[in-house]
Image: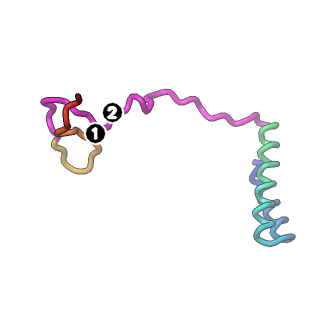
Amino acid sequence: MAGIVLSSAGSALGGSVAGTVGSFVGQTLGQIAGNAIDDKIFGPTRLPDVHGARLADLAVQTSSYGKMIPIVYGNIRIGGNVIWSQPRD
């Protein structure tokens, strides 16, 4: 909450003193000071830990013998299937 209040006050004060650039600088400094106050009162904000699939688990395109080609109706996202590729040596 202090970040919002000090950001607005810094923007108004900086704008009255130095115009548009002063408004931006005042807003930024007010936001930094307000966030520091909020962190002291409420504790630092922390992003939640995210658990789940990772990029290594992603298989966007596959190549397999005898796999059916999907038929879909409407708008749907499906992984691609390589119809033909050169064999590896």
Q: Magenta stretch containing residue 48, yes or no?
A: yes
Please indicate whether residue 56 sits to the left or right of residue 17 in the image. Answer: left
Which residue is the site of mark 1? 79
Measured along the vertical axis of the image, is residue 73 above or below residue 46? below
Measured along the vertical axis of the image, is residue 51 above or below residue 39? above
Identify the residue shown where x is 39% and y is 28%.
Answer: 57
Q: Position of residue 37 (x, y in %)?
A: 82, 43
Q: Position of residue 10 (x, y in %)?
A: 82, 60
Secondary element type, mark 1 = loop
Disc assigned to residue 19: none
Please indicate whether residue 38 sits to the left or right of residue 74 in the image. Answer: right
Disc assigned to residue 59: 2
Q: Position of residue 30 (x, y in %)?
A: 80, 54
**Inter-mark Cα distance, 2 to 1:** 8 Å
Query: Which region is colored magenta?
Result: 41-70
Report the colour scheme: rainbow
Instruction: Please state which amino acid type lies under the numbered disc 1.
Output: Gly
In this view, the residue in front, 58 or 14, is 58
Task: Looking at this view, name the residue that lies furthest to the front.
Answer: 89
Q: Quadrant of the C terminus?
A: top left
Q: Position of residue 48 (x, y in %)?
A: 59, 32
For the residues bearing labels 2 and 1, Cβ distance under 8 angstroms: yes
- Classify residue 15 by image quadrant: bottom right
